[in-house]
Image (cartoon, rainbow, N blue to C red):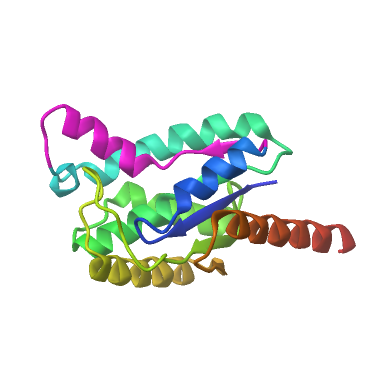
């Protein structure tokens, strides 16, 4: 079974949901952009997302992590973001997406091998806590949330909203949706 993507605005709670799913026994794939940002900030580059090869670095890490996730064939794997998110980030920043990223998104939408068509869109919690890697206001995050939504829809994914709320409630909603999707496949 291909992996399920968790996406949404920065600070919406994706990583907390991912941690909960991991503790519950599901294989998970970490977000790449945050790790690329953290590494390059540690190397003395305070805003790596402004560098011309940022999207390529994120995409390369996403690909490596996705290949490692293939070791969990047959299991439900959850991905904290995908290359479609990297495309949304390029659009949000007003940067030209690299051709490798556009090719990757095209492959993902035509092959449907790596990710499920259903994507869990984690809605904002009504605030954003700034971090070294997350320097975005709540208002900016709402704009970015909309860019994400449009980018996934344009790529042909079906979005399932995960509303704001307690962590356990959000995780339960995702698990129930996955169970429904699996049951529907068994019936067909």
Apparent side of residue 79 relative to residue 42 in the rendered image (left or right): right
Q: Which residues are magenta?
A: 25-46
Q: Is 81 a magenta residue?
A: no
Residue 41 inside the magenta-drawn segment: yes
Q: Is residue 12 visible?
A: yes
Q: Position of residue 20 (x, y in %)?
A: 58, 43
Q: Residue at x 10, y 30 (%)?
A: 44
Q: Nearer the viewer, residue 165 or 150?
A: 165
Name the residue at 29% across, 71% down: 143
> Is residue 102 visible to us here?
no
- Across and down, in percent, residue 138 comes to 27, 66
Side of 62 where 168 appears, left or right: right
- Who's the residue at 46% across and 39% down the image? 30
Q: Is residue 68 above or below residue 15?
A: above
Q: Is residue 128 left or right of residue 123?
A: left
> Between residues 20 and 28, which one lies in front from this camera angle?
20
């Amino acid at each position: 079974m291909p992996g399920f993507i968790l996406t949404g605005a920065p600070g919406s709670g994706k990583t907390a949901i991912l941690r909960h799913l991991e503790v519950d026994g599901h294989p998970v794939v970490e977000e790449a952009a945050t790790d690329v940002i953290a590494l390059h900030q540690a190397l003395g580059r305070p805003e790596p997302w402004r560098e011309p090869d940022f999207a390529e670095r994120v995409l390369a890490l996403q690909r490596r992590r996705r290949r490692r996730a293939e070791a969990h064939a047959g299991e439900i794997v959850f991905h904290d973001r995908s290359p479609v998110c990297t495309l949304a980030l390029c659009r949000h920043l007003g940067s030209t997406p690299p051709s490798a990223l556009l090719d990757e998104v095209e492959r993902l939408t035509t092959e449907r091998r790596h990710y499920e068509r259903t994507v869990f869109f984690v809605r904002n919690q009504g605030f954003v806590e700034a971090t070294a890697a997350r320097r975005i206001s709540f208002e900016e995050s709402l704009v970015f949330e909309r860019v994400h939504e449009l980018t996934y829809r344009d790529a042909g994914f079906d979005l399932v909203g995960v509303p704001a709320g307690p962590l356990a409630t959000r995780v339960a909603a995702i698990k129930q949706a996955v169970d429904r999707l699996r049951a529907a496949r068994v019936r067909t």
